Amino acid sequence: MTGLFGGAFDPPHNGHVALVDGALDHFALEGVVVIPTGSAPHKEISTPAEVRYRLAEAAFAGRERVELSRWELERGEPSYTVETTRWARERYGELIFLVGADQFAKLATWREPDEVLRLARLGVATRPGYDREELERVLGRLEDPGRVAFFEIAPTPVSSTEIRARSRHGEPLDDLVPPAVARLIEELRLYRDD
Ligand code: ATP
């Protein structure tokens, strides 16, 4: 089974890496395909896609079972999960789509969530601050909740929003992003106002 993990990765951080490592281990996956979004249907992203792709490469460098995909980047239009999953099903076979609990809580807003679940299982990493009851409510609205599996990862309470704010204020990124990502942010002077 292959994992799919999509995100803006603006920038990628240790929470993303923990999710991928946790899923590889928990589901004994053959691999995980990391898919940076080109433009997202629900989100304004100001950092160019090519830059976010480089950052994601840096974040996952050296992991044998992780590969990056340019599929969403090259489509030139916003990609919905259902479309990405349909493409990946053809290419990789049996799939598990990986998300954090915050994304899962918004499942009702996805395009064709039940079709996504027919095409792929869903692996949901529990993330600090999200209560189980809310997740159960989302499960209750699905045609086939048995396709959803939760897995615990060590809490990594960090978000891309926080990293961008820290960079803007010239604050250290400490252990919030992989060192190669911190170096690229510095080198490319990302998320600075100047
Ligand atoms: P932003 O702060 O810009 O909204 P983000 O940190 O939530 O970004 P995304 O690129 O939007 O990152 O998220 C991609 C995926 O990673 C989503 O499925 C999200 O749930 C998951 N994710 C993000 N942060 C964490 C974290 N700290 N721990 C576990 N999963 C996370």
Image: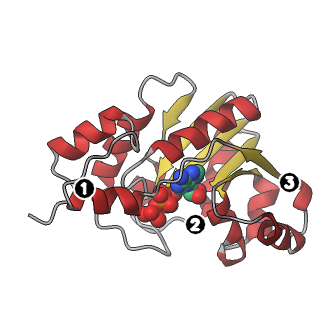
Residue, disc 1: 167
Q: Look at the numbered disc 3 and give the secondary structure of its residue.
A: helix
Q: Quadrant of the C terminus?
A: bottom left
Q: Do callouts 3 and 1 mark residues in contact (Cβ within 8 Å)? A: no
User: Which of the two residues, 40 or 185, is positioned nearer the viewer here?
Assistant: 185
Q: Look at the numbered disc 1 and give the secondary structure of its residue.
A: helix
Residue 70 visible from this viewpoint: yes
Q: Quadrant of the N terminus?
A: top right
Q: Look at the numbered disc 2 and give the secondary structure of its residue.
A: loop
Q: Is residue 151 above or below residue 60?
A: below
Residue, disc 2: 80
Mark 3 vs 1, N-terminal side: 3
Q: Is residue 83 above or below residue 50?
A: below
Mark 1 vs 2, N-terminal side: 2
Residue beneath the point at 31% across and 46% down: 173
Q: Amino acid at mark 3?
A: Arg
User: Which of the two residues, 165 or 31, is positioned nearer the viewer here?
Assistant: 165
Residue beneath the point at 74% across and 66% down: 131
Q: Amino acid at mark 2?
A: Tyr
Spatial separation of the CA atoms under disc 3 and disc 1? 39 Å
